[in-house]
Image (cartoon, rainbow, N blue to C red):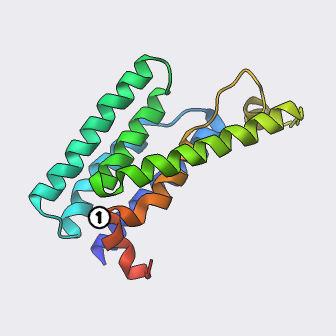
Amino acid sequence: MIATLFCLIFPGLLIYAAWHDLRTMTIPNWVSIALAVAFVPAAVATSQTVPQIGMHLAVGAATLLICAALFYLNIFGGGDAKVISAASLWMGLAGANRFVFCMAIAGGLLALVLIVLRRMKVSSDKAWAKRLLSPEEGAPYAVAIAIGALLAAPASPVLAHGLSSFGV
């Protein structure tokens, strides 16, 4: 039961990050911090061994280094880099490939939808939608990050254990 509660933090924070990014094109730092901090008690509650937890930490650290380089090269936003790293911490080695694949597909679909809507010159009175539909703006990539992480969650040993009580 406690493992399930800890594992519910993961989708909740990712959905919040996606929603916030969609509305403001920013992801609060506290979301990434909370994701990272919640991992350790979730891993302990799901009976992960110290070497398994260490591997998850290594994957998260390696992802943070890669994402920091992509941020430095102006490919990613800082919030995106931090959320991807925090989600990778939960995925570990077992779920990393599925996470990256699903995130990339979701990101491509997100870009396609934005391109089509922007070329159709769809408009809105809402400030957040107006910004989202502007060709000068980027994409709220936390949406793709959240979709990728949620689709990859069953491949994570920590999340799979937590989701098992739901029959997923």
Question: In the figure, is residue 144 to the left or right of 64?
Answer: right
Question: In the figure, is residue 158 to the left or right of 21?
Answer: left
> How many C-alpha atoms fall within 10 Å of the one at disc 1: few (<14), some, or many (≥20)?
many
Residue at the image position 82 percent from the left and 38 percent from the top: 117
The residue pinned by badge 1 equals: 158
- Dividing the image into 4 quarters, which one contains the N terminus? bottom left
Residue 127 location (% of width, % of height): 77, 33
Residue 14 visible in the shown view? yes
Residue 100 location (% of width, % of height): 44, 46
Residue at the image position 50 percent from the left and 60 percent from the top: 151
Per the image, label 1 sits on a secondary structure element best described as: helix
Residue 143 visible in the shown view? no
Question: In the figure, is residue 117 to the left or right of 61?
Answer: right
Residue 46 location (% of width, % of height): 23, 70
Q: Residue furthest left?
A: 50
* Nearer to us in this view, 164 or 24: 164
Residue 16 location (% of width, % of height): 53, 50
Please, what is the three-letter code of the amino acid marked with disc 1?
A: Val
Instruction: Please identify the quarter of the rendering in which residue 78 is found.
Output: top left
* Nearer to us in this view, 162 or 33: 162
Q: Is residue 34 above or below residue 165?
A: above
Q: Is residue 70 above or below residue 18?
A: above
Instruction: Please identify the quarter of the rendering in which residue 116 is found.
Output: top right
Residue at the image position 37 percent from the left and 22 percent from the top: 69
- Dividing the image into 4 quarters, which one contains the C terminus? bottom left
How many labels were placed on the picture? 1
